Amino acid sequence: MILAAQLSDTHFDLSARNTERVEAVMGYLADLPRRPDVILVTGDITDSGTPEQYAQARLALQTDLPLYLLPGNHDDRANFRTALLGEPATTTPINSVHTIGALTVIMLDSSIPGQPAGLLGEDTFDWLRATLAELPDGPILVALHHPPKRVFSPVVDVIALADPGRLAAVVAGDPRIVGILTGHAHAPIATTFAGKPMITCPSTASVLGGEWEVAPPDRVMDYAPEPALALHVIDENFGLTTHFRTVAMGGWLGVPPPA
C-alpha cells in the first residue's frame, strides 16, 4: 500500500489563520500511526504570490516526508521557483515527475500567469508525452490545479481547465494512469474523467459551495469549516481509494463529549 496525502488551496496570505490551519493538518499527518509516503500540494499555495507569502508557506509546510508542490492561479511562477524549489526565477510552466515506490506522480502546471482559468500549453503536453514514454509499468497519478471537468460550482466552472479534451485523450490512452488529482474548487469532489477517477481535494482555508448553495454576493466562500485534506491509497492491485478528512483545530478527542 502507498499512502499519498493531498493538501490544496492553502492560500498563505501572511495571516495567522491560514498558517495555523495548515500547521494543524501537517501535525495531523505527522502524528498518524501510519504516516503518508508522500504529501502533494495542488496549487494556490499563496493568495497573491508574494515572496513573503512563500516564505510563510515554506515554514508551515516543513516536514521530513517527501513533499511536492505545483502552482495554481493565485501563485507566481517566478517567486514559487525561487522560494519553494530553490531554482532561478523563470515564468515557464512548473511541471515535475516523482517516484514513490511503485507509484509515479506527474504534476502539471495548469496556471496561466495573470489569469484565473487554467490551460495546459503545448510545451507541457510535449513534456507529458515524453515523460509517459519513459516511465515503466506501474500506477500513475496525474495532478493539476484546475479540474478538467465541470464540478457544478458556479465559481469554479467558469475558470476551470480550458480544452480538457487534449488531456482526456492522454489519460484515456494510458492504462497506467489510475487517477487525476485536482484542487481549485475548495471542496471534496469525486467524479470520473476520461474513464478514470477524478478527485478534487478540499482547501485547508475555506469551502466553496455547489451551485445549490452559492448565492452571490454574500453567500459564496464559507470560512467556518475546519481545514480538510484527501488521503489516497494505492493498493497492491494499483487501485485508488480516497478518504477525505477534516482536521479539528482543537485536536484529537478520543472519548465522546459529555451529554
Image: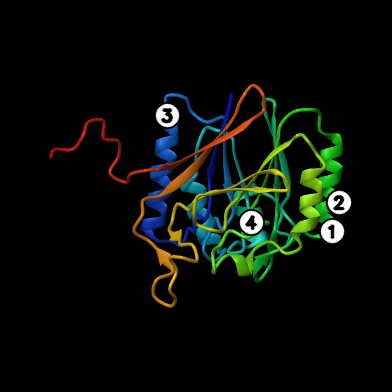
Classify mark 2: helix, strand or loop. helix
Tell whether 240 sits left or right of 122.
left
Q: Earlier in the sequence, mark 4 or mark 1?
A: 1
Classify mark 4: helix, strand or loop. loop
Disc 2 target residue: 126
Q: Position of residue 219 (x, y in %)?
A: 39, 71
139 to 168, vertically: above or below:
above
Q: Nearer the observer, disc 4 or disc 1?
A: 4
- Write down the quadrant of residue 96 in the picture: top right
What distance separates the C-alpha of mark 2 from that of mark 3? 39 Å
Q: Earlier in the sequence, mark 4 or mark 2?
A: 2
Tell whether 62 sits left or right of 77.
left
Mark 1 and mark 2 in contact? Answer it, CB < 8 Å. Answer: yes
- Inspect the image, locate mark 3, and give the three-letter code of the amino acid beneath it: Leu
Disc 3 target residue: 32
What distance separates the C-alpha of mark 1 from that of mark 3? 41 Å
Disc 4 target residue: 147
- Inspect the image, locate mark 1, and give the three-letter code of the amino acid beneath it: Glu
Decide which of 153, 27 is in the foreground and name it. 153
Disc 1 target residue: 122
Q: Nearer the observer, disc 4 or disc 2?
A: 4
What distance separates the C-alpha of mark 4 from that of mark 2? 20 Å
Q: Position of residue 198 (x, y in %)?
A: 63, 47
Q: Position of residue 81 (x, y in %)?
A: 66, 54
- Write down the quadrant of residue 155 in the picture: bottom right
